Image: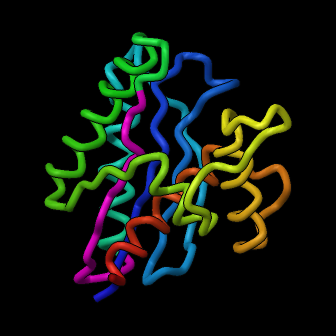
Amino acid sequence: MGFWVLAIDPSSSVNSVKNCIGFCVMRDGNLEETGEIIPDPLMGFTRVRRWVRDKIKMIRVKDSDPEIIVACESAYYKLNAAVFMGLIRVKAHIEAAVLDQGCVYREVSPLTSFQAATGLKQYPLNERGKRDGTRKPAIQSAVKARYNLPEDTSEHICDGISIAEAIIQKKQK
């Protein structure tokens, strides 16, 4: 029986060039797979639901009795209600697909995934002495170095890995 984490950095954007869903699959703390999928909000997220279902089924092919946790980063409102509502919508589809497959669904806050990836307690300061815009670059730097990932690995994939690391660290406590 393996401990599997399918970690998903959700996005609901129609703009597939800029935003996509980053993910990683970890088995017993080892990085097995990373990638991106393009969300399909105009089609009711059918591609996303099917992808989640199929990814869980493939884990079950590789492991006859897996413990599977599927985790997403929690939605952060910021200043754009439309983006927030889109994230809530795609996350609802992901959660429904996970529960339909009899797996566990968890959410991880952006701060928790940052801390898991970097080991830092707070976001670093930027050139203006503020903490704005430093979370994602810090995560990317830490994750790329730890897993020896190519420099062009997207922030979405790195966020997926940081979400998985947060789940793994919580389980180890």
Left or right position of 97 against 109: left
In this rendering, the answer to whether 33 lies above or below 29 is: above
Q: Position of residue 170 (x, y in %)?
A: 35, 73
Q: Quadrant of residue 171?
A: bottom left
Q: Quadrant of residue 48?
A: top left
Tell how many labels: 0
In this rendering, the answer to whether 63 lies above or below 141 is: below
Q: Position of residue 67 (x, y in %)?
A: 25, 76
Foreground pick, 143 / 37 = 143
- What is the basis of the colouring in this image? rainbow
| 64 in the magenta segment | yes
Q: Position of residue 22 (x, y in %)?
A: 56, 45
Furthest toward the front, the residue is: 129
Left or right position of 27 against 157: left
Foreground pick, 103 / 141 = 141
Image quarter where the N terminus lies is: bottom left
Give the residue drawn at x 45%, y 25%. 12
In this rendering, the answer to whether 36 lies above or below 81 is: below
Magenta residues, as a range? 62-76
Q: Quadrant of residue 57?
A: bottom left
Give the residue drawn at x 35%, y 55%. 71
Give the residue drawn at x 33%, y 82%. 173
Left or right position of 152 against 131: right
Give the residue drawn at x 71%, y 74%. 146
| 143 in the magenta segment | no
Foreground pick, 18 / 80 = 80
Foreground pick, 18 / 102 = 18
